[in-house]
Amino acid sequence: MALYRLLLETSSRTPLVALADERAVVIEERLEAQRRNARDLVPTIARLLAHVGRKPRDLAGILVGLGPGSYTSLRVGLMTAKTLAYAVGCPLVGVPTMPILAQQAAEARVDVVIDAQKDLVYAQSFDHGKPLGDLRIVAVGTWLAERDPAVLATGPGLSKIVDPLVRRAVEAVWHPTAAGVLAVGSVLPPADPFTLVPLYLRPSAAEQQWDARGT
């Protein structure tokens, strides 16, 4: 009987749900932007499993995107993955989104940017899939001033950058794909479902508002 792993990536506006066997992605589905909560993810997972004649207990593992990205969507995706992995007793692997986007660019050197709201982006550089520095949040102007313009740039953060001198990857690889999640996640070790957390780098908007009130 073929073994299937579940792939969840909810950092973007169109969350991804997929199943992969031991070799490649078998089936995948993107949810609409407004369908990013648990009540939409779970039926989608069940539908894909039914398509290949399997039940949740048959899963050989779960690969889940850690972001950075949408605070709420990441939290929902990760909690869904953690709950399911615990319930069925399968390995859980957390997959950072930045290496996924770097891998999809298919170039040795690449700068990855994801929208961090306002005039900010999450930014990280890679060389042959290895990070050249820590993931950080920077102003768009700072990122443009510090980077090498000859290096390829990718990621959804490019949608807010209008500089014509930025050498861009094709837009089709700006967002995580199931194949990208599988390629990066397959070589990462399992994580503890009780301690795995998304990559936020900063408090949520609600937490910032709470702190601003001085409480």
Image (cartoon, rainbow, N blue to C red):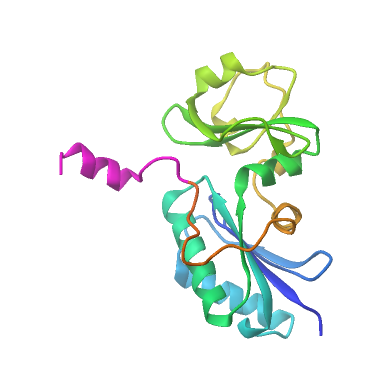
- Image: 176 above or below 154: below
Residue 201 painted magenta:
yes
Quadrant in which the C terminus appears: top left
Left or right: 3, with 161 as reference point: right
- Quadrant of res 189: bottom right
Residue shown at the point (76%, 54%) measured from the top left: 183
In the rendered image, residue 57, in percent from the top left (x then y), is placed at: 62, 84
On screen, residue 108 above or below 7 = above
| Depth order, front residue of 52/5 | 5
- Whether residue 35 is visible: no
> Does 58 sit above or below residue 66?
below
How many labels sit on residues? 0
User: Nearest the camera: 185 or 149?
Assistant: 185
| Residue in view at x 60 percent, y 49 percent | 96
* Location of residue 148 in the rendering, given as x and y in whole percent from the top left corner: 68, 17
On screen, residue 5 versus residue 88, left or right, reads right
Judged from this view, the residue extending furthest toward the top is 145
Report whether residue 186 is seen: yes
Q: Quadrant of the N terminus?
A: bottom right
Front one among 34 and 151: 151
Outermost right residue: 23
Does the magenta run of residues contain 202?
yes
Name the residue: 48% across, 56% down.
Answer: 197
Residue 16 image position (x, y, % from top left): 62, 59
Q: Position of residue 178 (x, y in %)?
A: 71, 57
What residue range appears in magenta?
200-215
Left or right, 206 with respect to 176, comes to: left
